[in-house]
Amino acid sequence: MKNNVFLMQGNEACVQGALDAGMRFFAGYPITPSTELAELSAQKLPKLGGKFIQMEDEIASMAAIIGASLAGLKSMTATSGPGFSLKQENLGFACITEVPCVVVNVQRGGPSTGLPTSPAQGEVMQSRWGTHGDHPIIVISPSTVKEAYMFAIKAFNLSEKYRVPVILLMDEVVAHMRERIEIPDKASLEIVNRKKPSKDKEKYLPYEETEDLIPPMASFGEGYRYHVTGLTHDETGFPSTNPENAKKQINRLLNKIEMYRDDIVKYDEYETEDADIILVAYGSIARSAKSAVKEARDKGKKIGLFRPITIWPFPEERLKELGKKAEHVIVTEMNMGQLVLEVERIIKSDANVHLLGKANGEIITPEEILSKIGEVENNGK
């Protein structure tokens, strides 16, 4: 067997991807089903000169990775369910202060303590709107162990490139399944590091209105004057309540993501070109949906799969195109209806949108999807 081929768990692959992307700081608190991410980081980071710290709770964990990133280290935390809720306030702080960091959320059944060892996809909307106010965010959802590895790298690259927190939205199935994975040669990986300032230290503006909308970021300890606050601030980083300045800063935060949609947004398609019915699925359920498409095609049915890889920003332009050609769109997700709301907004009246939702701790099977396809075919609207 090749020495770069492994049988890996999703959580294990995610940690390896993060390390290969340059993660050198992890702060977290054990919580099922993300605990392996902390355990493996604790084992591996010290061997690379990195730092691992178990914090007293998820609030402190989020604060710690923000501080480490401000000091120049690529930083990550991981959590699930209630822990993700606790991270929201400091996640907002990272958004307004434009601190690169990666948050892995391994979704489980909820609300509250819910079903700690069972899969779910209940934080789709929380990942976008969980922290208050208008803010930028990037959310990526892997469906395979290999993607857990590759998307961990992608999460760090996007975070560093755009000075924004990135959420890797996994679910318990992807986190705990084991698959054969071939780790690429590190020399072949594209690794992005944050843009550093080139001006004189006296002229440095940490939130400067640059042409590309992404200010260069100095690290604490490098001699640059750098004020950080959760208050709305001006280009110097110091608080400002001026309405025009607030508008300017918030618009830049949002526009720096919107402006680079083509670089950020990713999706996958399977058998969509002639499809009368499009399945929309993400995470582990995309695997069930793909199996259902194959079986339906074997029976002569024109079914296709659209899988958003970037959940936020959502790949709406392509879905809009597919919605104009298909008669029905079925959204399959392990919740009672979250991403379906976004799909309905995008599709509008072009196609009939249906939900196959489930929130009992069990995955949605190919058989259930095929049954839903039959129901839609028989009942039309």
Image: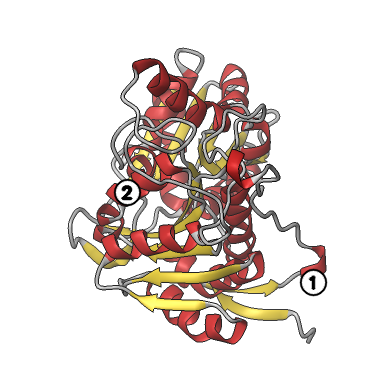
Residue 21, by quadrant, is bottom right
Q: Is residue 157 visible?
A: yes
State the image quarter where residue 153 is shown: bottom right
- Counting from the top left corner in percent of width and height, residue 300 is at 65, 38
Image: 181 above or below 132: below
10 Å neighbourhood of mark 1: few (<14), some, or many (≥20)?
Answer: few
Q: Nearer the viewer, mark 2 or mark 1?
A: 1
Rendered location of residue 66, percent (x, y):
42, 57
Q: Which residue is mark 1?
A: 185
Q: Residue furthest top?
A: 349
Tell me which residue sits at (38%, 57%) in the image: 363
User: Can residue 381 be seen?
Assistant: no
Could you tell me which quadrant the C terminus lies in? top left
Are the residues flagged by discs 2 and 1 in contact, CB closer than 8 Å?
A: no
Q: Is residue 226 above or below residue 117?
A: above
Q: Nearer the viewer, residue 276 or 320?
A: 320
Name the residue nearer the viewer: 149 or 61.
61
Q: Residue at x 47, y 28 (%)?
A: 377
Q: Quarter holding the N terminus?
A: bottom right
| Residue 180, position as x, y percentages in the image | 65, 75
| Type of amino acid at the residue the image marks with label 1 | Asp
96 left or right of 166? left
Label 2 residue SS: loop
On screen, residue 111 above or below 338: below
Judging by the rendered image, the residue that carries numbered circle 2 is 122
Task: Tell me, for residue 342, which label it has, or none.
Answer: none
Three-letter amino acid code of the residue under disc 2: Gly
